[in-house]
Amino acid sequence: MLNVGIDWGEKTLNTFSILNEEKVFVKEGQVERSVAGALNLIDQIKEFQTDPDKVRIGIDRKNDVLTRVLHSKGYQVFPLNPLSAERARKIYWPSGKKDDYTDSKVHALMIANDYQMWEPLKEENKRNKQIQSLLQTRNSLARMQAQNRQRLGSILSEATPVISELCKNLRLCWVKDFLNTWPLHQDFHKAHGNRLNAFLNNHRVSDSTRKQIRSAWQKQPYEHDRETAECYRLRIQTLMDTISCLEEKIDRIEDKISKLSAEHKDREIFSSLPTNSENTIAALCTAFGPDRDQSYSWRNYSAFFGTSPITEESGKSKTVHMRQSRDSVIYKALMDFADSTSRQEDCWAHTYYGRKRREGKSHYHALRCLASRWVKILHTMWKKRTKYDEDFHRRRRQERGSMGSAKPTEVGKKENLSA
């Protein structure tokens, strides 16, 4: 079996080292980060092994042109964690030597000695991949939108405190129209009463909000000089246009996500969950993949998604901390789902979340615990192709409650039977 290690570089040439079956490095070199570079590397590998099934390739990058081309040609490509590679380098080169060729040799040795510990790239379901890509783009745009809303709120608070207090919720339609019409308090104060009445009649707002708007209109504004006022108007309008553009893009992406998830084969399973969020349902449809015969437990998925913590123990020392390496798309969907169900009083998640809070857990800590519980349920639903049944979980909780009041010997018997 031939083993190839590649040290990935974004702006530099990618260094490779080839290790033969006798654990001898027979060739090393550099190739471009491109399709041509990948094909060049394949030609050099074929000098020693022409059968792709007998070649293992380790590279410290998962989504890249090199990995995609090599995988498409039938090679076993193992994406390596850069942190693991850094620690492995200290094993093979304790002196601290570090350069591109050393790193490529480390990757080759890691695959040659411990390839069983790494998961090779697999052919992904195209629909799942497209949905996850759209969700990742949607989440990125949503973060940009939230950042621009924060900037807009900061400018309003600085330039026009009265309007800032009035227009707290920048997601409301009347607030958007209001700021596009009167960005500053001095602009609003000069508006004619008929124009204000027309604005109120064209928008559905509560009576209390109408009183607040009229009260703000009657207050004496701070008059900015002409140049300063123009600068503030420009900044506010620019941010409003940016937010509106991002909102339009997000709506289009969400429509595409809804259409793709509507045709997903697991849609019927996950749409039975207590949520109306199309983004959450779409993400959960892609979370576990198409292969139900694989042996991964729900704990493996919980760790991969980032909802379960990392525990470090040594002697009497024990540290538990949040997992930073995770699938960001699924993690966000699970946290949003956990937050939504924790607020539903008729759902078991509401009771579970309240208990964790009473134990002293923070809001997000309790949500991660709840999300991990949901992963167990979701994994069973996906594995057995069964829909969610709230009554079933309510009965299970009642059974556990009755078991808690039983004798110790009886509890042990029941736990063994349920296991």
Image (cartoon, helix red, strand yellow):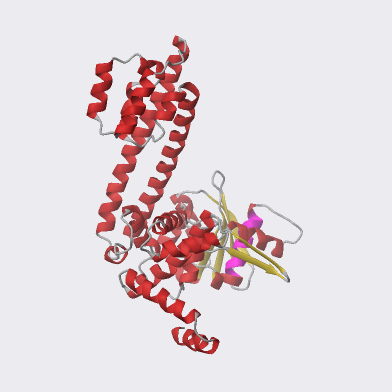
**Residue 50 visible in the shown view:** no
Q: Nearer the viewer, residue 75 or 146?
A: 146
Q: Residue at x 50, y 64 (%)?
A: 355
**Left or right: where does residue 5 sit relative to residue 202?**
right
Q: Quadrant of residue 160?
A: top left
Residue that sits furthest to the right in the current view: 95
Q: Nearer the viewer, residue 246 or 8?
A: 246
The image position of residue 200, as x and y in percent, is 26, 27
> Is 259 above or below relative to 290?
above
Q: Quadrant of the N terminus?
A: bottom right
> Is 415 above or below relative to 280?
below
**Left or right: where does residue 375 sit relative to residue 208?**
right
> Is 105 above or below relative to 418?
above
> Is 1 above or below relative to 275?
below
Q: Residue at x 67, y 52 (%)?
A: 99
The image position of residue 229, as x and y in percent, is 44, 15
Q: Residue at x 24, y 59 (%)?
A: 263
Residue range corresponding to the magenta coloring: 101-112
**Residue 157 visible in the shown view:** yes
Residue that sits furthest to the top in the current view: 226
The image position of residue 137, as x and y in percent, is 39, 46
